[in-house]
Amino acid sequence: PSVIYLKDYEVPAFRVEQTELRFELEEEQTLVRSQVRYVRNPDSANRQHPLVLDGHETLELQRLSIDGEVLSDKDYRRSGEQLLIPNLPDHFTLECITRIEPQNNTALEGLYKSDGMFCTQCEAEGFRRITFYQDRPDVMALFETTIVADKLRYPVLLSNGNMVDAGEEDDGRHWVKWQDPFPKPAYLFALVGGDLQFIEDRYTTSSGRHVVLKIFAEAKDLDKLEYAMNSLKHSMRWDEQVYGREYDLDIFMIVAVDFFNMGAMENKGLNIFNTSCVLAHPETTVDAGFQRVEGVVAHEYFHNWSGNRVTCRDWFQLSLKEGFTVFRDSQFSADMNSATVKRIEDVTLLRTAQFAEDAGPMAHPVRPASFIEISNFYTLTVYEKGCEVVRMLHTLLGAQTFRKGSDLYFDRHDGQAVTTDDFVQAMADVSGRDMSRFKLWYSQSGTPQVSVTGEYDAQNQRYTLHMHQRCPATPDMATKQPFLIPVAVGLLDPQGADIPLQGGETTEVLELIATEQSFVFENIPVEPIPSLLRGFSAPVKLKFPYSREQLVFLMQHDSDGFNRWDAAQQLAVGIMSELIADHQQGRELILDQALVDAYQQVLSDTELDKAMVAKVLTLPSEAYLSELAEVIDVDGIYRVRRFVRDSIANQLETLFLRIYQDNNSAEPYSPDAASVARRSLKNLALAYLMATEKQEYLQLALQQYRQADNMTDSQAALTLIVHSGFAQQASEVLDDFYQRWQNESLVVNQWLAVQASDPKEGALARVQALQQHPAYDGANPNKIRSLISIFCAQNMLNFHNTDGSGYRFLADQIIVLNKQNPQIASRLLTPLTRWKRYPQERSALMKAELERIRNSGDLSRDVFEVLSKSLV
Ligand code: HT7
Ligand code: ZN
């Protein structure tokens, strides 16, 4: 497979004025007729350029004609994934008929069937599986789509834009015609055909436009759509208030499908969602699920401006829409819930998974310079680090100037396909700042490391912070220039109060631009304790030589909620890292009382937000400890985490019991922030109580499991019981849970995940047995994620079994999925790609499995790219 480079970008040879599509949906085949009006692009350097159309090998070409004249196979050339037509006039209409088989499309790209329903996924390059087309985001066209299908089987036929006509044929088929008034690239095209029900609502925009809102799902799921509808309306209002962006069509539709490679898709006017990101009901959905629905509905809706009205020039610019939209949805979720908790969750994801990506073989900049398969670049770097880059712009410019910049960006580029440079330029223009150094965040990969020391000059009442930055080499880039790093800083006096800084503010954003730089604070009357990188103002690893006492002090006093939590994390990480070393040396494990005391203080503080207490008392995950380790000691990390958890549980048992009882309210379920916080604290307390392995707490968990009126409490209890040593009760609740929820596919996914993450011995055999269970479907990505991905990512001890069985198992799955669904296969590879981080014995076994996959035969581009980068 060939490598595609950003530096080779050329404008398209032809523009498209109009794209008319007609789909005849049948059981054995779908016929697609496209009629496309092309115009030679005056901006293209070569006026003789042939028309180059993309078309997947599965397309059966039935007819090609230009302005009514049928072409013979001498008039065009089909080569690989392309169709070339030379000698064309400057204006013409190309008609193309293709035959495709959506019912056999297991890749879930293009047009496919999900549970008997036709649906599409065209981003990034799925449209070329439907018809021959310039399948690139800078070719934007007006689409008109007619869908013809059997009326009984497929009563609902949807596409983008507004429905303009409909009718019936004599043979039991009906048809519907949709017109989208906004030009769009092919990746935003969507079609749905199925037997669907919907809920409906209305929304009036701030300028008075009436919009019909519809959410479609299978009839059995109709009662799980209300939360998404409310989230949609909140998102629409929020985007008007915070970004001045209104919705622009008369209808906005969401469709829930069960087979989907990612979370959701922002197709113009017709979003398609993985059921896991749209269905929510207290009895079947946990709190985190509700929050995910709210976040994803907002994300896809916000794309209507950041992605659809202004789109990407090419796929290297993916973060233009994704980084910005993740930033927008994170602001929205922060506004709807607790801002600090949202920040903690986002940073936890970034630090565990994105930092690991930056440290692995697939490291790439937010704007990659090359790729083999673009689907491999829908990554945490493009999304989450891309969001952090936009957040840094917001921090550097301030909210008001940032808003001016986004207004200018949307006005200047409405209807265009543009680049991340254009986005930064709008911010530079409104602020008058030179952003050239800032742009290195888009072009350089790797996680910068910032080392800070403090120096107090008592005589002159001066405090100086010395900073040093470096960014380690990544496989794609050996040397890096210094970044512009905004470091938000506050200084605490010995009582824990913020010392006023220049201008009377208590937080100042320092701009670190050189490799070494010092920042001086005048009029500091006492030696302060610095609070650094407040709110995690930049995606870096920051080190300051804090003592444990200082971290405890920051935990108690920092006015920045994020940093209070982070001080607790740093304290725990420091203590656990030492214990891991002790474990490796065979020394007895002794827990530093400082951690227990600090946790006890937090638990006893009735002023603190409950969600914050739960976050502070959650120990760093195995994944985060792994990311921080030079060489990953799987057993050491697991044992030490257990030891620390159990020690805390035993010492603070009475307190945990009181917390549990105080928060075990009998109020009916509500997904509001305060109730979520209460449940999270209660269930954290239950987890610590269960760690004591006492019968009485097993009874408490069983009681919660039986009496819960909501899935959050019932699943929390289920997980604790299943993961405990109480084997009989574990098996009883698992059976009970399945009997009760077997007809709820998303709940069954949770049942699979609980078993896949059970750390007890023999997990692989249990996972393999579950693959044979009627509840499992190896063609459904949600099932694969719940069972296989969870086993590999959240069951470290079993996946990394030194007999190599976990690695072998994963490789076997990838070999099968490589043919069936390459996108999913390639994503599943991730844990094996990290082989260099493990000690020799494990790393050799992992590498051998990567090699076995490489030798297994025909590799998809997706799997090939990840393998080839991992095996250098
Ligand atoms: N923009 C959407 C991306 C997406 C996607 C990409 C590759 C393969 C399947 C996919 N499904 C959706 C999702 C989003 O970021 O909003
Ligand atoms: Zn997105």
Image (cartoon, rainbow, N blue to C red):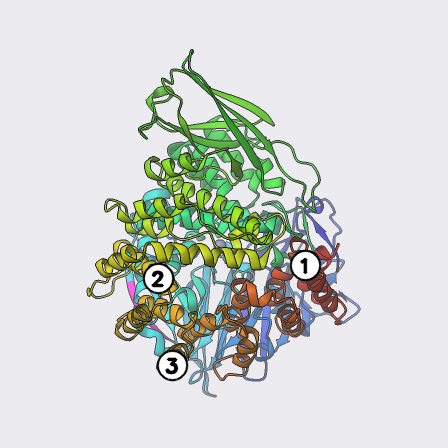
Q: Is residue 637 magenta?
A: no
* 141 shown above or below 121: above
Q: Nearer the viewer, residue 585 or 729?
A: 585
Q: Residue at x 66, y 47 (%)?
A: 11
Q: Nearer the viewer, residue 847 or 481?
A: 847
Q: Element under label 2?
A: helix
Q: Which residue is mark 1?
A: 866
* 28 shown above or below 188: below
Residue type, label 1:
Val
> How far, Cα to Cα, is label 2 from label 1?
33 Å
In the visual, does 591 lie left or right of 812?
left
Q: Quadrant of the N terminus?
A: bottom right
**Is most of the magenta stretch helix, strand or loop?**
strand
* 805 shown above or below 459: below
Q: Residue at x 25, y 73 (%)?
A: 707
Q: Which residue is mark 3?
A: 732
Q: Earlier in the sequence, mark 2 or mark 3?
A: 2
Q: Residues within 10 Å of mark 2 (few under 14, many from 20)?
A: many
Q: Which residue is mark 2?
A: 290
In the visual, does 13 lie left or right of 282?
right
Q: Earlier in the sequence, mark 2 or mark 1?
A: 2
Query: How many marks are shown on the rendered structure?
Result: 3
Could you tell me residue 832's position as x and y percent? 64, 61
> How far, Cα to Cα, is label 1 from label 3?
42 Å
Residue type, label 3:
Glu
